[in-house]
Amino acid sequence: MRKFEEMVAAQGGRLDGHLPVATKHEIVSQRMGYLKAIDCRIIGQCVVALGGGRQRTEDSIDPRVGIVWRKKIGDRVEKGETIGWLHADSSDVDDWCLRLSNALVLTDETVNPRPLVLEQIGVKRWGRIAIRSLTHCRFVAMRMRLYSRFLVGAFLKTESEQVYVGCNVERTFRSA
């Protein structure tokens, strides 16, 4: 816990006191089926539109905005079931709850959940930076080091062999 507290303090955060909380709204399924996919673009658009993310660097972030999902790929969903909650204070929150409900792609056929990790790309340490075997990932890991004194790099390889690199600085995530 001490290390976590150091990381929070180094980034200007604090752990004392209570965090502000937005109103909690139910996200309700519009139909029944098995959860096949999630349209993350819709989720991202919702969070940014409600103030939980930035479109430009000068935009402020409302830390109260967030989404909690109750379902994962492969789960059965019933019509009218609460599939998650949207935390936000906005006049058009009902529209966003409907959009978020439609971001979940349902099918009538049973869906097998995918493994959480498809492949681990080799890792070796160089100082405090995790270096991956991919040339571009080496460069990006070194660049990320400029933003934090902690290991913040993340690398994701999809089933289609696309590699994504990112870090937790301002929710950065970009394609390699």
Image (cartoon, rainbow, N blue to C red):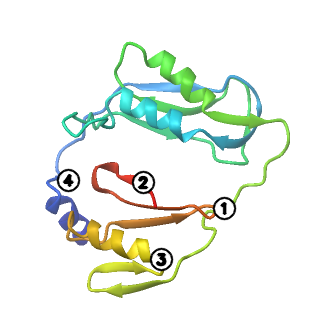
Give the residue at mark 2.
174
Give the residue at mark 1.
159
Q: Quadrant of the N terminus?
A: bottom left
Of pointers 4 and 3, the one earlier in the residue sequence: 4
Of pointers 2 and 1, the one earlier in the residue sequence: 1
User: What distance separates the C-alpha of mark 2 from that of mark 3?
Assistant: 16 Å
Q: Secondary structure at mark 2?
A: strand
Give the residue at mark 3.
134
Does the CB distance between marks 1 and 4 fall below 8 Å?
no
Q: Secondary structure at mark 4?
A: loop
Quadrant of res 55: top left
User: What distance separates the C-alpha of mark 1 from that of mark 4?
Assistant: 38 Å
Residue 78 locus on image (x, y percent)? 74, 30
* 10 Å crowding of disc 2: few (<14), some (14-19), many (20+): few
Residue 144 locus on image (x, y percent)? 28, 66
23 relative position to 127: left or right: right
Of pointers 3 and 1, the one earlier in the residue sequence: 3
1 relative position to 165: left or right: left
**In the image, which disc is placed on residue 46?**
none
Which amino acid does the dot numbered 1 rest on?
Glu
Which amino acid does the dot numbered 4 rest on?
Leu
Give the residue at mark 4.
15
